[in-house]
Image: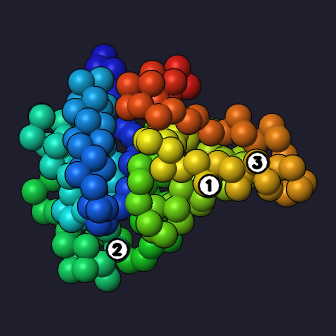
Amino acid sequence: MAVKRKKICVYCGSRLGVHAKYQELAISLGQALVKRNWDLVYGGGRVGLMGVISQTVMQNGGDVIGVIPGGLFGKEVADTQITDLRVVASMHERKALMEQLSDGFIALPGGWGTLDEYFEILTWAQIGIHRKPIGILNFEGFFDPLLQQTEVMIREGFIDPKNLDLLTVDPTVEGLLRKLESRL
């Protein structure tokens, strides 16, 4: 019987960011996923960091599942060259299908869309909809302000401190994947 391949959902920018280091990070993560024989689940676009990581996984022989709402098909320039592109009706359906398909989640640098997906999957874990690991690749402190705000919300009584256990944070690709692997 074949072993089921792990599928990791990566939330990241539909833009490249202002520094090449973000593209290099996406390439590094894509290569590391393929090295572990893990598949990529992502937002289905071929632009920004999304495009960089999906193209990296494909070029290195990995499998990629993209999930994109029909309304964003043109705006995010859907990547029709990936293993499996699924078109859904809405962002709600996109996020739900990405969760169903994935064994774990990683947030890379990105904008509001990245944070929207990250917060939703984190909230779903908090209320028990899933028990899958959630990672933050805190490359060069990108997410430090967000993590500091989390500490404020805990201190002020809006988040139970035990919910920090829902997060796995590391500044390096290998460190984060090693931590997530132990929770998959």
Q: Where is residue 135 in the image (x, y as percent from the top left)?
A: 52, 39
Which badge, 3 or 1, is on the more N-terminal residue? 1
Quarter location, residue 168? top right
Q: Residue at x 30, y 37 (%)?
A: 29
Q: Disc 1 designates what residue?
A: 146
Q: Disc 2 designates what residue?
A: 69
Secondary element type, mark 1: helix
Q: Which residue is drawn at 24% across and 24% down?
A: 35
Of badges 2 and 3, the one in the foreground is 3
- 38 horizontally vs 178: left or right: left
The CA span between labels 3 and 1 is 9 Å
- 183 horizontally vs 47: left or right: right
On the question of residue 98 being in view, the answer is: yes
Q: In which quarter of the image is the N terminus?
A: top left
Mark 3 touches mark 1? (CB < 8 Å): no
Secondary element type, mark 2: strand
Kind of residue at badge 1: Leu
Which badge, 1 or 2, is on the more N-terminal residue? 2
Q: Which residue is at the far top?
A: 1
- 43 horizontally vs 170: left or right: left
The CA span between labels 1 and 2 is 27 Å
Kind of residue at badge 2: Pro
Secondary element type, mark 3: helix
Any mark on residue 151, and which? 3
